[in-house]
Amino acid sequence: MDVSYTASELLAVSASRLLADGKIVFAGVGTPLLAASLARLTHAPHLTIVVEGGAIGLEAEPGRLPISTNEMRAGRRAVMLPSITQIFLYAQRGYFDYGFLGGAQIDPYGNINTSVIGPAERPRVRLPGSGGACDIACHCREIVIVTRHERRRFVERLDFVTSPGQVGAGDGRRRAGLLFGRVTAVVTDLALMDFDPATGRMRVVALQPGADLAQVREQTGFELAAAAEPDRLPAPSEQELALVRALDPARTFLG
Amino acid sequence: MATVTFVEARRRLEAKARPMRDKRMAAADAASLVRDGDHVAIGGCLYSRTPMLLLREVLRHRRRDLVLSRNLMCYEGELFLVSGASRDLVTSWVGIGLPWGLSRIVREFVEGGRARLEEWSHLAIGLRYHAGAMGVPFLPTLSMLGSDLLRTTGARTMTCPFTGEQLCLVPALFPDVALIHVHRADPFGNAQIDGYPHMDLDIAAAAQTVVLSAEEIVDPEQIRRTADRTAIPFFAVDAVVEAPYGAYPHECYGLYEADLDHIDAYARRVAAEGAAAVRAYLDEYVYGPATLEAFLELFGAGRLLRQSRSARELTGRWT
């Protein structure tokens, strides 16, 4: 059976499969919220979604997804609307199992830049900034990075570390003072990656349908370790695709 | 930039009389409480419960050298940059939202060295206001450890004297003025907020002067009957402005959704024409309409009603 799908649909479906039932996920708008909402509609009906604008347990309405986490669409059917500071303090306290992040630039240690390209004092490109990304990266127990796989994104050195991943080699995260949480997965439209505990660097765990290792390496600006025969991720099912498309029929986030 | 210490902030607060008096005033008078050079904290978050009427009034007063702080800065930051009212933004994120991409105006001003954007993490901004609200000089957090934000902001690290662990310390922020839009307030400034509180309780308590706009001015007896809903007490408030649709074209929880068509049209025009589009917007929507009513007439009653209907539908509030 041949089912076609776009890269953004693939990202949302792949990311949704990483979320276990009964857990709590700190999600941003866009692909993270699509993935978390899809997980609730499929294998994880008891997954709780939390967003930084201040909503716990929201149930976004298909076709009416929030564009920002602080608007009333993001609070639909929530069980609590705490202050923004309080939401992040719950994260710091350790309540949130997963944190979803995207990013303009990602390095081999899973650190992310969403602040500046060029020097911080006089940037060549001023990006939007951290928002809650740095906080999610510092506090959530399992941090999952979801992004398109492009060579300009996956770089050996960041211009600026906005959100810390493993920080550096070995116990870099611990040495920076981050006692909790770690980056567990990087999901792209080409592969699923994790981090080698010995080196702290990103490595390929499995390939997306149709992708090969040479292609992944070509789209990565740093040396990327991989098993000789990486696993193959299953393609999105018809049901998953139908559900994710129904969530965003106007394709505001699916593109 | 001079920063107010927690000692000075306390002394300034003690020097003011704070009786339970009628603080209602016209928007223009309330906005005159903002002086050149002030640090102005903006309530709400992004395009939610932004005190848009008050911000327009501050722009109409042609203030200069303002420092604006906000958790997430929407396009109001662009209006203040292009009008020349501010060159200093303190925030964790700037933009309108994912579909609209990077802010062309913020990029041009910051990359051109004409404005400064001081970026903190979202929690760090929240803890800075919270420390101010607590009357202490800083708060510890694990946020921003391992991030370059630690080196580009005024944050510091210390070794915890109890556990020996490393901590990030963020300095208290004491804004000169906080502008906050609420659902209802009595004439004394006892205020209630429905839905998301965002960071407004903290910025109200941290600021030296607090200006509220309220969808509805209510009898103090109504506040007393529902005191558990009160978010901001009268003694933190200096001015109360009656402002139905006072956050429009941004949203007000349960009352009206953000006018995303309006925001989208603005964003498209700015993306195409840059600062000239912002200047045209300022003329049409800020300097032009002299009153809130005149501003709302630019949208028309049907449009306002449509936004209200969808808000009530979303939050299940049909009253």
Image (cartoon, rainbow, N blue to C red):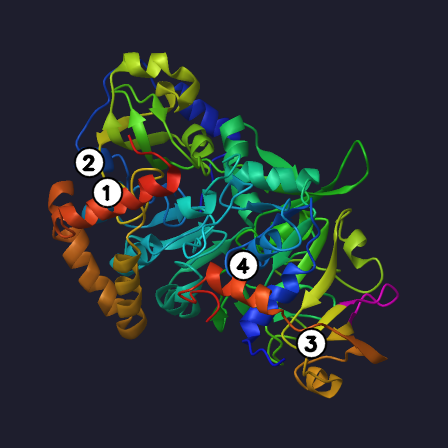
Q: Chain of mark 3?
A: A
Q: Secondary structure at mark 4?
A: helix
Identify which residue is drawn at 76% across, 53% down. A176
Quarter of the image where one finds residue A250: bottom left
Q: Nearer the viewer, mark 1 or mark 4?
A: 4
Q: Which residues are magenta?
A: A194-203
Q: Quadrant of residue B185?
A: top left
Q: Residues within 10 Å of mark 4 (few under 14, many from 20)?
A: many
Q: According to the image, label 1 marks what residue?
A: B53
Residue of label 3: A208
Q: Residue furthest front?
A: A1
* Residue B63: % across, % down: 25, 47
Mark 1 to mark 4: distance in Å? Answer: 34 Å
Residue at x 55%, y 64% (from the top left corner): A114
The disc, 2 or 1, on the residue closer to the chain's N-terminal end is: 2
At label 2, the amino acid type is Ala
Q: Which residue, given by chain and number where applicable, does mark 4 sit on? A: A34
Q: Are marks 2 and 1 in contact (CB under 8 Å)?
A: yes
Tag 3's secondary structure? loop
Same chain for mark 1 and mark 4? The answer is no
Q: Nearer the viewer, mark 1 or mark 3?
A: 3
Count of marks overlaid on the render: 4
Residue mark closest to the camera, 4 vs 2: 4
- On the same chain: label 2 and label 3? no
Image coords of residue B71 (percent x, y): 46, 46
| Residue identifier under label 2 | B27
Q: Main secondary structure of the magenta part?
A: loop
